Image: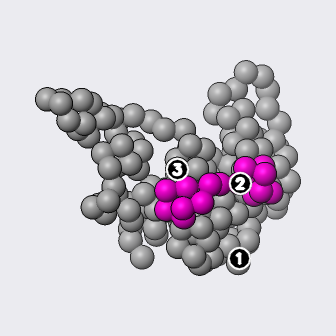
Amino acid sequence: MSQIDDFAQSLLEESKRFLEKARDGGEASGIDAHLHAALMLAFSSLEAHVNSISDDFVDRPEMSVHDKAILLEREVRLEKGEFTLTSVLKMVRLEDRIQFLHVRFSGNPLDRNQVWWTRFAEATSLRNQLTHPKELLVIKPDAVERAIQAIIDTIDALYQAIYKRPFPAAARGIDSALTF
């Protein structure tokens, strides 16, 4: 397992543990902080897993400059008549990268009617409301639990499609291995 894989898994475990801490109770402000941390760490874990999957494929000779640009989130420029990958960051929406990975490395289009995709979209909406607040957001533990499970299911769907095996941590669900 690579360092990024370990880190991605660690972020997921931290997320699940913060959810457990929120469920344990305490002051309302502490519960909110734990829920916010759980949600944001879960998405950080997903980003790290997507980056890890991207790293697995980026150096393959069949990858075009444009494929590499999406995998590495880098800008492509036309220089001297050829497309060139630059070091300039070019962000790609997480949803788009997930769809790209699924299609490019499984050979099959992603079915956006799958339950896991719908739940992932709901989790993304919740994350966006927290990341870009326009009004007071009250997050409940059940919503964060569903979001974390959606992220686990999204990673599992990518593993199933790309590697033809389940995401190892999927079997544990939202139960954390941490005790802090």
Q: Nearer the viewer, residue 92 or 141?
A: 92
Q: Say left or right for 125 vs 95.
A: right
Q: CA distance from mark 2 to mark 3?
A: 12 Å
Q: In this figure, which residue is indicated by the disc labeled 3?
A: 100
Residue extent of the magenta highlight: 103-119
Q: In this figure, which residue is indicated by the disc labeled 2?
A: 111
Question: Contact (CB < 8 A) between labels 2 and 1?
Answer: no
Q: Which residue shows up at 71% across the image and 54% down it?
A: 111
Q: Earlier in the sequence, mark 2 or mark 1?
A: 2
Element at badge 2?
loop
Answer few, some or many: residues within 10 Å of disc 2's Cα (few below 14, many 20 plus, some between 14 and 19): few
Count of numbered marks: 3
Element at badge 1?
helix
Residue 85 in sight from this viewpoint: yes
Marker disc for residue 172: 1
Relative to 129, is 43 above or below?
Answer: below
Residue 35 position, x and y percent, is 73, 49
Relative to 133, is 95 above or below?
Answer: below
Q: Which residue shows up at 42% across the image and 57% down it?
A: 54
Residue 166 position, x and y percent, is 63, 76
Q: Dividing the picture into quarters, in which one does residue 77 lie?
A: top left
Relative to 54, is 30 above or below?
Answer: above
Marker disc for residue 130: none
Q: Which residue shows up at 59% across the image and 67% down it?
A: 161
Type of residue at label 1? Arg
